[in-house]
Amino acid sequence: MKHVSYEEWLKYVENELSEKVREKYEEHLYSCDDCMEIYLTALEASETSFPGFSEDHFTDSIIADIQRYKEPVEPDAGKKQKFYQRAAFHYLIAAAMTILLMYTGVFQQLIGFTEEFERSSRPSITNELMNKTTNFIENVEKETREEQN
Ligand SMILES: [Zn+2]
C-alpha cells in the first residue's frame, strides 16, 4: 500500500472516512513510521482546531477525571487495592525495622530478653516476623512474575 497523505490522515482523525478505509489506514499505520508521524501531526492540528475543545475544556475534563479517580467507582476494587498497599507498607516497615534493629544490636538484647520469657517451643517473634516478611516478599515476586507473563 502506498503512503497516506496528510489530508487523508486529517480526514481519518476527524472521522470522515468509511470504516473500510479507516481499517486500511490503521493497518498501514502500524507498519509505517512515516505515516505515524504525519498522522500525529494531523492529530495535533485537528485537536487545536476542534470546536469546543479549547484548553479550558481540556483542563476541566482532566480535573473531572482526577476527581473521579479519587472516588473509586468500584468500592470493592478500591478497598482491595488499598488493603494490599497497606499490608505491603506495614511489611516493609517491619522488614526495615528488623534490619535496623539487627544492625544496631538492639535485636540481640531483645532476643535475649524475650527468650528469658519464652523458653517454650513457640517460634520466637523474630523468626515469625522474618518468616512472614520473607513469605510476603516471595508472594510479591511471584505475583509480579505472573503479571509480566
Ligand atoms: Zn506510510
Image (cartoon, rainbow, N blue to C red):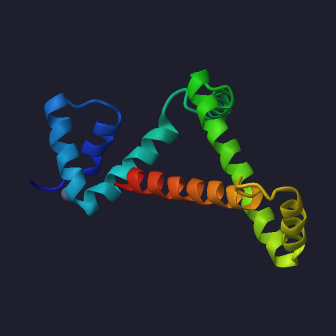
Q: Is residue 65 left or right of residue 113?
A: left
Horizontally, is 20 left or right of 26 in the view?
A: left
Q: In this view, does 44 lie to the left or right of 34?
A: right
Q: Position of residue 98 (x, y in %)?
A: 77, 65
Q: Is residue 18 shown above or below 85?
A: above
Query: Residue 66 sits in which quadrant?
Result: top right
Q: How many marks?
A: 0
Residue found 66% across the figure and 30% down from its top: 60
Q: Residue, x 62% and y 41% (percent of image)?
A: 84
Quadrant where ligand 1 appears: bottom left
Q: Which image quadrant for residue 100?
A: bottom right
Quadrant holding the C terminus: bottom left
* Side (left or right) of 71 relative to 7: right
- What residue is drawn where x is 37% and y is 47%? 42
Residue 27: horizontal and vertical position, in percent? 18, 47
For the residue pair 123 and 105, the one nearer the viewer reads as 123
In the displayed structure, would residue 119 be above or below residue 108? Answer: above
Q: Is residue 46 above or below residue 4?
A: above
* Residue 4 visible here: no
Give 66 or 4, whichever is nearer the viewer: 66
Q: At which x and y percent is residue 103?
A: 82, 77
Whole-percent x, y for residue 97 in the image: 80, 63
